[in-house]
Amino acid sequence: MNIWVAFGVLSVGIIIWILLIRKLNTRTWERHGSSVHVRHTRGDLGEVHVPPHRIALWVFLAVITSLFGLFFSAYFIRMGHGHGSDHGMISDWHSVSKPPILWFNSAMLVLSSVAMQLARGALKSNKRARVSGYLWAGGAFAILFIAGQLVAWRQLYDSGYGLTSGPAGAFFYVLTGVHGLHLLGGLIVWLKTVARMRTRAVELIDVRLSIELCTVYWHYLLLVWLVMFALLLFT
């Protein structure tokens, strides 16, 4: 029954992820650069220019935070009931062995986030080659992270921890899977940005906002992964 609950939560997460990614894509992050703004008037302070795409991202991150918060809460609740020592229940929570490659994957995600930040910083110097190089590096490290996660799944499965081996294993696949799906969504926007930069007619200012929002998204997913990795390691 617990496995089906995990699958149900994963399915809901995937549906929400798809709907939100489609919503953000219709906002055309990379189409108008930083020239599109929402204007608010605050008394005598004048107009405050806020790109609508930035607002959309922060709303999106708020929804993701709620989603992962529910996952982490379910993890702790299920782990507590699974031990069963204080409730007379049969213990069915058995910690899974953590594949060592998770450390490598963590390093790749850190490097990816750093590269994206360097690309964002290089925008100030208006050097197209440097921005493009850092942007490519950020995406490459992110792809290595996802590939490493697939290897970790394979190693876990070979160790005897499949989706039906117990609640701890099921949660490992669900948590890391949902995180990987969100990173894949970011890579879609990253790929569109890289493709536009290969067009000489497109200036850096036209993709500035897209790079900035991608960088914020990368930093956020790194933070979520570090919290998740610590949770998996110490529980």
Image: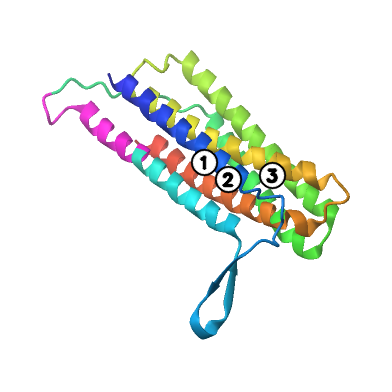
Image x and y of residue 151, in percent = 58, 23
Which residue does the image show at 84% across and 44% down from the upper left?
Answer: 198
Q: Secondary structure at mark 2?
A: helix
Which residue lies most toward the bottom here? 44
Q: Give the mark, 3 or 1, whose residue is nearer the N terminus.
A: 1
Marks 1,2: beta carbons within 8 A: yes
Q: Nearer the viewer, residue 13 or 232?
A: 13
Residue type at tag 3: Gly
Q: Between label 3 and label 1, give the one nearer the viewer.
A: 1
Cα separation between marks 3 and 1 = 23 Å
Image x and y of residue 133, in percent = 79, 47
Q: Nearer the viewer, residue 26 or 216?
A: 26
Residue type at tag 2: Leu
Cα separation between marks 3 and 2 = 21 Å
Relative horizontal placement of residue 147, taking residue 223 as reference (left or right):
right
Label placed on residue 20: 1
